[in-house]
Image (spheres, rainbow, N blue to C red):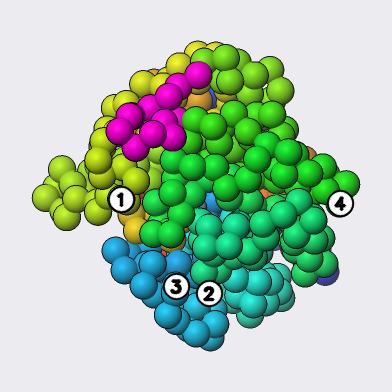
Amino acid sequence: MPTSSVFKARRIARADLTGWLSDHAVIVTDGRIEAVLPAAKLPSDVAKTRQVFDLGDVSLLPGLVDVHSHMHCSATADSYHLVTTESVSQLLLRASGNVRKVLLSGVTTLRDLGSRNEVAFPLRDAVRSGVVPGPRLLLAGTPITTTAGHCYMFGTEADTVEQVITAVRHQKKLGADCIKIMATGGMFTPTANPRSVQYPASTLKAATQEAERLGMQIAAHTLSSQGVRNCAEAGIHHLIHARWLHHDARKGLDYDPAVSERLAKNGQVVDVTFGHMLIGAEREKAGGEPHKLHWSVAVTPVTNEDHIKVTRDMREKGVKFITGLDMGMSTAPFDHSAYNAKSFVEYLDYSTWEAIRASTVDSARALGLGDVTGALRPGLSADLMSVRGDPAQDITALLNAVDVVLEGKPVKLGGRPLV
Ligand SMILES: [Zn+2]
């Protein structure tokens, strides 16, 4: 039986996400947006044929898209300890709580970039069949990394080109939508140096070609200058972090504007994870424990301002940014995805609407979901989130979702979870 509904709101985002339509309504049939029209034009007996939700004085937007989580990590200071010691059952239980939090915060599409296969794939099945509430999930399954490399404790260790290709194929076989590979070490892993590359460009290129052959995108974690250069050369689709640490621990950054130009020219996009950085900065300012530095950057600390400065230049060179919080890491809680947009405004001089587009339509398109979600226009999935106030005036309004609708089904109304 077709399910038809109407969502009325004081402000509804225009299809191109450049401004508001006032007192409009989104008409939904079978989970898809059928039309967006002035509420005054609804037939007077609309309630006879459709379920009508009058959301009131809220701003209604497309559901957020977050391109980067680790669903079974705890987002606490002891996240490393927990993920290295807990059983698969414990990780699965935590992950199921986490994906519900994600959904209720207004994120209707989430890409997980690295979790144990025994957690990620069964959980996606449970979400799809309605056993566990959660957003639309795209999965990498385990990240591919070197022996003792970044996130090896929940990754697939693969050192040679042959092993990496086999690992890509294995993830495809298990049901992966995309591939995650660790191009450099990372701050989460004591045995992996973020300043050093884990693979030469040729291995990353082989992984990219294999992912493309199998119809998948590939995302690569990279924190060092040489790592970014290798990702550019290998044609990696999405660079994660894209920091520019010098390989020499006595030095700070080693930024190369020519590589940024190359990324922009190739259309390679970056999940800069600045939302994560902003949450950490706000916590420290509020008197929280400062982040414990990885040994590789303890000698010559690099400030947030250093990273922001070069990342602004990346933007000036034309590099496009998408929104991934790195949920699950120590200062990236599962209900804080809107910090991505806030950080783009505060750190990168985005306008509020630019930040909203980055968090919705731009990220949806980068995931290949431009015809599925990311905007309020006919034909797309009815994935909605609303907030009080006007996020175009004050982006922090996005932090508190009041209503959330996934594929036409309300999962939160008036601030009250329904799932
Ligand atoms: Zn991550």
Q: Are marks 1 and 2 in contact (CB under 8 Å)?
A: no
Q: Quadrant of the N terminus?
A: bottom right
Give the SS element for disc 4.
Answer: loop
Q: Relative to 264, say whether 170 is above or below.
A: below
Mark 3 neighbour class, 10 Å CA radius: few under 14, some 14 to 19, many 20 or more? many
User: Who comes first in sequence, dot 1 or dot 4?
Assistant: 4
Is label 3 or label 1 in front?
1
Is label 2 or label 4 in front?
4
Look at the image and say whether residue 112 sits in the magenta stretch: no
Q: Are marks 2 and 3 in contact (CB under 8 Å)?
A: no
Q: Amino acid at mark 1?
A: Trp
Going by the picture, which residue comes out furthest to the left? 287
Q: Relative to 211, say whether 101 is above or below.
A: below
Residue sitting at x 44%, y 45%: 194
Mark 4 neighbour class, 10 Å CA radius: few under 14, some 14 to 19, many 20 or more? some
Look at the image and say whether residue 255 sits in the magenta stretch: yes
Give the SS element for disc 1.
Answer: helix
Q: How far apart, in angstroms, are the residues tagged by discs 1 and 4?
A: 38 Å
Q: Quadrant of residue 329?
A: bottom left
Q: Which mark is residue 96?
A: 2
Q: Amino acid at mark 3?
A: Val
User: Who comes first in sequence, dot 1 or dot 2?
Assistant: 2
- Residue on which disc 1 sits: 295
Mark 1 neighbour class, 10 Å CA radius: few under 14, some 14 to 19, many 20 or more? some
- Residue on which disc 4 sits: 214
Q: Which mark is residue 181?
A: none
From the top left corner, tell me how far across and down residue 37 is, in percent: 66, 35
